[in-house]
Image (cartoon, rainbow, N blue to C red):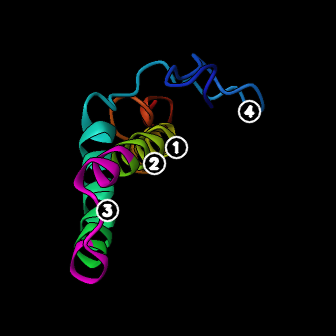
C-alpha cells in the first residue's frame, strides 16, 4: 500500500483499488504519540524506582528508544488508518458501490 515511508500509492498494485482519496491526515501521528507514551512511561517509572540510573544516560537511551519506536509505528498506523477508512467506506472508498 505504501510506495515510500509515509506516501500511500495512488492505487493498489494487486487489486487496483484507488487509494489516492484517503484522509489519514494527523491521526497516525497522534496515535503514535499516544502509544509510544503509554509504552515508555511505565518502563521509565520502573527503571527510576528500582535502579536510580544516571539521568543523562537515561535521557539518551529513552530518546533513542522513543524515536526508534515512533519510526517503526508511524507507517504501520498510517496503513491502519487507510485500511479503516477503506473498511468503513469513508472518504470516497465506497463511491463505486453506490452507482
Please tell me which residue is depicted at 30% across the width and 37% down the height of the picture. 29
Q: Is residue 49 covered in magenta?
A: yes
Mark 4 Cα-neighbour bin, 10 Å: few <14, some 14–19, many ≥20: few
Quadrant hosting residue 11: top right
Mark 1 / mark 3, whichever is N-terminal: 3
The foreground one among 69 and 12 is 69
Secondary structure beneath dot 4 equals loop
- Residue 8, given in percent of the width and then of the height, sits at 53, 23
**Pointer 2 with pointer 4, Cβ within 8 A:** no
**Foreground pick, 87 / 65:** 65
The Cα–Cα distance between marks 1 and 3, rounded to whole angstroms, is 14 Å
Label 3 sits on a secondary structure element that is helix
Q: Residue at x 62, y 29 (%)?
A: 17
Q: Which residue is mark 1?
A: 72
Name which residue lies at 23% across and 72% down.
Answer: 48
Q: Quadrant of residue 24?
A: top left
Give the left or right position of residue 31, taking residue 97 as reference: left
Circle 4 residue: 15
Residue 28: give x, y in percent of width and height.
33, 40
Residue 69, label in figure: 2
Residue range in magenta is: 48-60
Indicate the secondary structure of the residue bearing disc 2. Answer: helix
Q: Nearer the viewer, mark 4 or mark 1?
A: 1
Which mark is first along the chain, 1 or 4? 4
Q: CA distance from mark 4 to mark 3?
A: 38 Å
Q: Are marks 2 and 1 in contact (CB under 8 Å)?
A: yes
Q: Label 2, label 4: how many angstroms apart (C-alpha)?
A: 31 Å
In the rendered image, residue 35, in percent from the top left (x then y), is placed at 31, 57
The answer to whether residue 1 is magenta is no
Cα–Cα gap, marks 4 and 1: 26 Å
**Residue linked to disc 3:** 40
Look at the magenta stretch and give its main secondary structure: helix
Amino acid at each position: 500500500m505504501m510506495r515510500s515511508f509515509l506516501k500511500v500509492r495512488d492505487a493498489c498494485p494487486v487489486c487496483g483499488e484507488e487509494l489516492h482519496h484517503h484522509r489519514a491526515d494527523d491521526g497516525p501521528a497522534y496515535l503514535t504519540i499516544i502509544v509510544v507514551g503509554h509504552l515508555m512511561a511505565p518502563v521509565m517509572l520502573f527503571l527510576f524506582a528500582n535502579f536510580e540510573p544516571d539521568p543523562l544516560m537515561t535521557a539518551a537511551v529513552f530518546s533513542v528508544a522513543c524515536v526508534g519506536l515512533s519510526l517503526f509505528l508511524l507507517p504501520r498506523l498510517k496503513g491502519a488508518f487507510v485500511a479503516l477508512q477503506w473498511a468503513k467506506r469513508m472518504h470516497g472508498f465506497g463511491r463505486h458501490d453506490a452507482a
